[in-house]
Amino acid sequence: GAVVSQHPSRVICKSGTSVKIECRSLDFQATTMFWYRQFPKKSLMLMATSNEGSKATYEQGVEKDKFLINHASLTLSTLTVTSAHPEDSSFYICSVVPGGGPDTQYFGPGTRLTVL
Amino acid sequence: TQLLEQSPQFLSIQEGENLTVYCNSSSVFSSLQWYRQEPGEGPVLLVTVVTGGEVKKLKRLTFQFGDARKDSSLHITAAQPGDTGLYLCAGGSSNDYKLSFGAGTTVTVRA
């Protein structure tokens, strides 16, 4: 399977600040990555599809100006939560798709964001 | 709304017992994936099934994909405390690689 890292693992910030979360594919080049958020004891909710070299595709109801995604290289996608508010507090998880076969996704370890 | 209905939502059993988690949909999927997630961590892939009627066994875990590729089940034999976690099923689309997740089943295995 693919190895995916996320940084930071935990972040606490003040309301109104912006936070950047990195997702790295460590052992292969990923043209497609996904960003999810997860509330306590709930399933994953897809936020957006990150495409290398092009704009991200956002799911309905997700504010693209609020959650900025940059997929500048084949191994790195970043999610920036702009002007964060307490309701943005959540567990954010990225995934990668190795491709070339089943649409299996491999997930990063997640980033816990707490906005005070 | 979830395209995949997962049941039961919660399951608490004694060590050594068996358990089955179900994942059902009215949609056809190109693949069905099962993940286990522990608190504060990302989901870890257990298996991907792609062929209707496919059965995969991984030690004490047995995964089945329905003939019509709309449903799946996960069966654990002789459960151990280490099997405790949130089990997620996800249906795949070969068009855009997106996954549709079930709501999850929280499994607790008591020692």
Image (cartoon, rainbow, N blue to C red):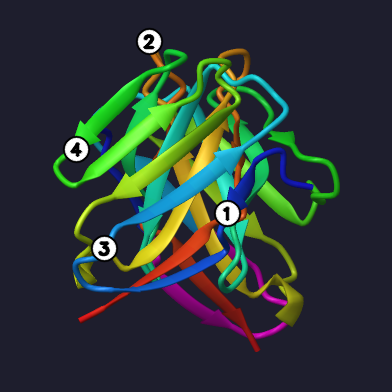
Question: In this figure, which residue is indicated by the disc labeled 4?
Answer: B58
Which chain contains the residue that carries disc 1? B
Q: Secondary structure at mark 2?
A: loop
Question: In this figure, which residue is indicated by the disc labeled 3?
Answer: B83
Do marks 2 and 3 share a chain? no
Q: Is residue B78 visible?
A: yes
Question: In this figure, which residue is indicated by the disc labeled 1?
Answer: B7
Question: In this figure, which residue is indicated by the disc labeled 2?
Answer: A100
How many residues crowd mark 3 within 10 Å: few (<14), some (14–19), many (20+)? some
Which three-letter amino acid code belongs to the residue tagged 3?
A: Asp
Do marks 3 and 1 share a chain? yes
Q: Are marks 1 and 4 in contact (CB under 8 Å)?
A: no
CA gap, disc 4 and disc 3: 13 Å
Pick the front one: B25 or A105: B25
Q: Secondary structure at mark 1?
A: strand
Q: Residue at x 62, y 34 (%)?
A: A49
CA gap, disc 1 and disc 4: 21 Å
CA gap, disc 2 and disc 1: 31 Å
Which chain contains the residue that carries disc 4? B
Q: Which mark is in front, 4 or 2?
A: 4
CA gap, disc 2 and disc 3: 31 Å
